[in-house]
Image (spheres, helix red, strand yellow):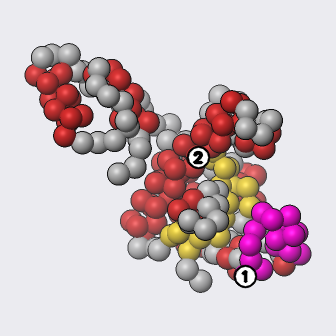
Amino acid sequence: MQHNSNIEVLQRALGIAADGLRGPKTNAAILAAADAGRLSVEAPAPVVALPFPEASEAKLKGVHGDLAGIVREAYSRSPVPFAVIEGLRTKERQAQLVKAGASKTMNSYHLTGHAVDLWPVDPNTGKNLPSDAAFKRGSAEARAADKALWDGLRKIAATMQAVAAERGVSLTWGGGWTNFPDAPHFQIKR
């Protein structure tokens, strides 16, 4: 089971051990609270579809049509706004990333337009969330930035994967890779 911060918040509100995991104790506490009239459900906030940003659209130039379509649809449905930070790459750009240690291969799916990198955007400022590298290594700020970034990317990934599945396209999220996790990375088969 994967930790879910929404479940953890609910567990705290119910007064049970907050581990962020679904299970029989959480289910029983929810039902007991509902039976006792201590649980209410609010209607979801209306979703306002924002136009796909021009800067992100420009970075989809040369990206495979199936993947570009998934990105656009996911943007309209994602609970976390995001930007396309990179799409199609040149061999020179890929070589720079390999040299810097930001990529491990010269056979990247970015070279053929079968990959994009997405980044969560702060809905209040419209700016990309900072990475942990923007703060002192190991600091509380760096840890908070890393957590916010991964939380956002997990939600974006869930939306991307749902859209891809609906369209019958096999999509891989780099955040699930164990040897070199690349959370902003999404790719389709060549």
Q: Quadrant of residue 6?
A: top left
Per the rendered image, the range of residues in magenta is 92-107
Amino acid type of disc 1?
Answer: Asn
Q: Residues within 10 Å of mark 2 (few under 14, many from 20)?
A: some
x 10%, y 22%: residue: 35
- The residue under label 1 is 107
Q: Earlier in the sequence, mark 1 or mark 2?
A: 1
Q: Nearer the viewer, residue 104 or 127?
A: 104
Q: Nearer the viewer, residue 19 or 53?
A: 19
- The residue under label 2 is 150
Amino acid type of disc 2?
Answer: Trp
Cα distance in 3D space between marks 1 and 2: 25 Å
- The picture places residue 111, in percent across and down from the top left corner, at 74, 78
Q: Magenta segment: does it hold 99?
A: yes
- The picture places residue 154, in percent across and down from the top left corner, at 52, 50
Q: Residues within 10 Å of mark 1 (few under 14, many from 20)?
A: few
x 42%, y 59%: residue: 162
- The picture places residue 92, in percent across and down from the top left corner, at 89, 75
